Amino acid sequence: MCNKDHISSAVARFFPNIGLQSFQPTRIVPLYFPAWIFDAELRGNVRYQDVEREAVVQLQDGYLPGSDFNVISSVPIFSAEVTTAEDQPWSTDLMIQFGQEISCLPFTVHPLSGLKALEPWKPDFFSGLHVYTNTIKANLAVFRPILIPMYLAQYEAETQIPGENRQVTLFIQAASNDTPVFGYRSPTSYTDEYDRGFDEFSKTLKFAPSPNSEVYTFGPKNKFVNVSTFSLSPPRDISKALSGWIEWKMHDPETIQEIAQSSDLSSPLVDSDPRIRDYDPDERSQVEDWMEVGSEMMMVHRILERINEQMESIGDDAPNHMRAPIKNLEANEKELSQKRKEALPEWWREYEHTQEQEDNDDQNDSGSHS
């Protein structure tokens, strides 16, 4: 499953002047790495350009490590956008491949409880925008647990100094063909001016996926999440800024450690909450369709806001021909709203209904005791 030439190219960057045909890893470990694939639309109160208002953001093709295993958990080893990967229901038969037993790392991260560790964060990703994180709620959120097949290969090469060796671990996911090779130099590895020069060179060519990452990436770079749209203007600039901020935070090894420490794994991963769902391509497409209508609604709403601002600045002298597009846009927004209600996945509709009943029961209980 691994691209031999791809790995050799990566090894060559760490170990120059080595005949790669005879250079073999000291150890290869096949394993399954747990992860969560998620999509979410979130709303919350913000202060933007000194105005208090509500904002909405869509996060799609999200990747959250399911384990806080050192190093591997600090990079997105799998792109949630890939379509070449075939999903396969889990069975114990998958623990043996080609006569070899495959290790399986356990889930140590649960998104519903673990992500609460991020509530104290103070997002400062865009000038003039302040997010009140304690007000964030989900218009829809779904998390799908998966296991990603991958290989870890450890390499070691002698140096001119007796007893001092260069040590590098490479890892690659084996679920799809177009995949990067990740490299990590062990802290106990011998280093000299060549290694320090390579570090500087890698930053120039952006082999490091993030300035705060200790992992090198050779090949296409995956993202932790795609910030597809933001309700405020300019949406592209804000989405890009938020995406960069998320990447920076998630490449920090301490982030996944905090999420793991807050994770409650006492309940089953699946069936304990309707927001935790088996990976189903058809169901995922339904969520994508719903979010696409929401993205179109946001665009229409931003245009309406802009026109209304212009009308207010003109005042009573605003020409009548400017009012016609407003009516058309308002009708379009209403039509999209209805379309989105109809496209809402049934399981989320049932979840919201259950939440409303629980909230009403809690209010009744508190009223009876007052």
Image (cartoon, rainbow, N blue to C red):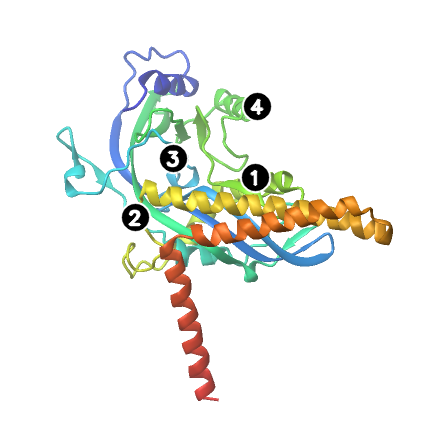
Amino acid on which the number 4 mark rests in the picture = Thr
> Which residue was labeled with disc 3?
78
> Which residue was labeled with disc 4?
204
Sequence-wise first label, 2 or 1: 1
Residue drawn at the location 49% of the way across and 43% of the way down: 292
Q: Nearer the viewer, residue 337 or 103?
A: 337
**Front position among marks 4 and 2:** 2
Residue 36 in sight: no
| Label 3 crowd (10 A; few <14 / some 14-19 / many >=20) | many
For the N terminus, the quadrant is top left
Q: Which mark is residue 244?
A: 1
Amino acid on which the number 1 mark rests in the picture = Gly
Q: Secondary structure at mark 1?
A: helix
> Which residue was labeled with disc 2?
278
* Distance between the alpha carbons at the discs numbered 2 and 1: 29 Å
* Distance between the alpha carbons at the discs numbered 3 and 2: 17 Å
**Are the two marked residues, 3 and 2, in contact with CB atoms closer than 8 angstroms?**
no
| Label 4 crowd (10 A; few <14 / some 14-19 / many >=20) | few
Sequence-wise first label, 4 or 2: 4
* Distance between the alpha carbons at the discs numbered 4 and 2: 41 Å
Sequence-wise first label, 1 or 3: 3
Sequence-wise first label, 3 or 2: 3
* Distance between the alpha carbons at the discs numbered 1 and 3: 18 Å
**Front position among marks 3 and 4:** 3
Q: Is residue 10 left or right of residue 249?
A: left
Q: Secondary structure at mark 4?
A: helix
**Are the two marked residues, 1 and 4, in contact with CB atoms closer than 8 angstroms?**
no
Residue 256 in sight: yes
Up/down of 236 relative to 44, above or below: above
Residue drawn at the location 57% of the way across and 53% of the way down: 334
Amino acid on which the number 3 mark rests in the picture = Phe
